[in-house]
Amino acid sequence: MKVLHSCHEAFAHAHHVRLEGQRLGFVPTMGALHEGHLALVRRSKEECDATAVSIFVNPTQFGPGEDYQQYPRTLEQDCQGLRDLGVDFVFVPTAQDLYPVGFSTYVHPPRVAEPLEGKFRPGHFRGVATVVLKLFHIIPATAAYFGRKDYQQLLVIRRMVEDLNVPIRIVDCPTVREADGLAMSSRNRYLSPQQRQAALCLWKALNAARERLASGEREGAALQRHMLDVLYDQGADRVDYAVVADPDTLEPLQEVDRTAIALIAAHVGKTRLIDNLLLEPSPPDEPN
Ligand code: PAF
């Protein structure tokens, strides 16, 4: 497995793979890899002839006071895991490589970036969209793999790729969970054993919404209130949002009369966690 540091080398390598007519799968990451990332790599390996991974903790997607400095950096371990999976090359640029002196061009993210994360982390999706577009130029892959845990990010990237005619297929992959339901996240490493237990409140609240819906409650606001109750009752210290929304636009739904998505961002101690779950209303004539 090659570990490439310069944009030029990464482009040359990716370009070569494509010129040979091979399908190149790409998994962009910020490192601190866990099973969720590895599942993206496995999917890419199943579907493509070669797989590239990038590891870059992107400063432009962190706001002031967020965890850019503390974000776990475990490059050696990450590379070992990727090597074991048979990844072809890893791109590990520095911040100076991607944002050299004078850098001043950013992607204005699509409308779907505005609610939820967009409200609580202003500038976050501008940074994500910018770095992802840059990475897509450096690694002109056939397909790129993203986890559904970052659901809004997935919608932002899908829209950006469509709007800006980027010829890369975006593949969304299911959230990988621990045995007890906690969504895998690099930020789970911040949790103490007690907080790790409390962090389950997100998964419990999402399931509580699903159960309430199954028992006949279709009012979006009532489902949201129920999620908030469960979150605070089960260990959240602060909730940024707990909403039931349209899965394409992320507009809150007044009534869940079609597929919806429940999305949560909550703090446990100093750690901010996100999670989501698709909700299907049961047919009206079916007894619950
Ligand atoms: O999901 C992530 O890890 C990051 O937001 C991404 C897509 C690698 C961009 O920095």
Image (spheres, helix red, strand yellow):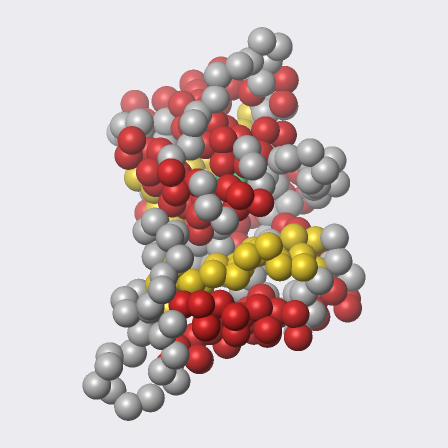
Q: Nearer the viewer, residue 251 or 19?
A: 251
Q: Is residue 190 above or below residue 196?
A: above
Q: Is residue 61 above or below residue 234?
A: above
Which residue is depicted at the point 59% across and 25% down? 93
Which residue is depicted at the point 69% across and 40% down? 66
Q: Nearer the viewer, residue 5 or 65?
A: 65
Q: Is residue 25 visible?
A: no
Q: Residue 231 is drawn in which quadrant?
A: bottom right
Residue 233 is situated, as x and y percent measured from the top left of the image, at 66, 75
Q: Is residue 284 above or below residue 162?
A: below
Which residue is depicted at the point 62% across and 59% down? 239
| Quarter placement of the C terminus | bottom left
Q: Residue 178 is drawn in which quadrant?
A: bottom right
Residue 36 is situated, as x and y percent measured from the top left of the image, at 52, 54
Q: Is residue 106 above or below residue 52?
A: above
Q: Is residue 217 visible?
A: yes
Query: Residue pushed farthest bottom?
Result: 287
Q: Nearer the viewer, residue 84 or 203?
A: 203
Residue 116 is situated, as x and y percent measured from the top left of the image, at 50, 49
Q: Nearer the viewer, residue 4 or 83?
A: 4
Q: Is residue 101 left or right of residue 155?
A: right
Residue 124 is situated, as x and y percent measured from the top left of the image, at 55, 36
Query: Residue pushed farthest left?
Result: 285
Q: Is residue 87 left or right of residue 102?
A: left
Q: How many marks?
A: 0
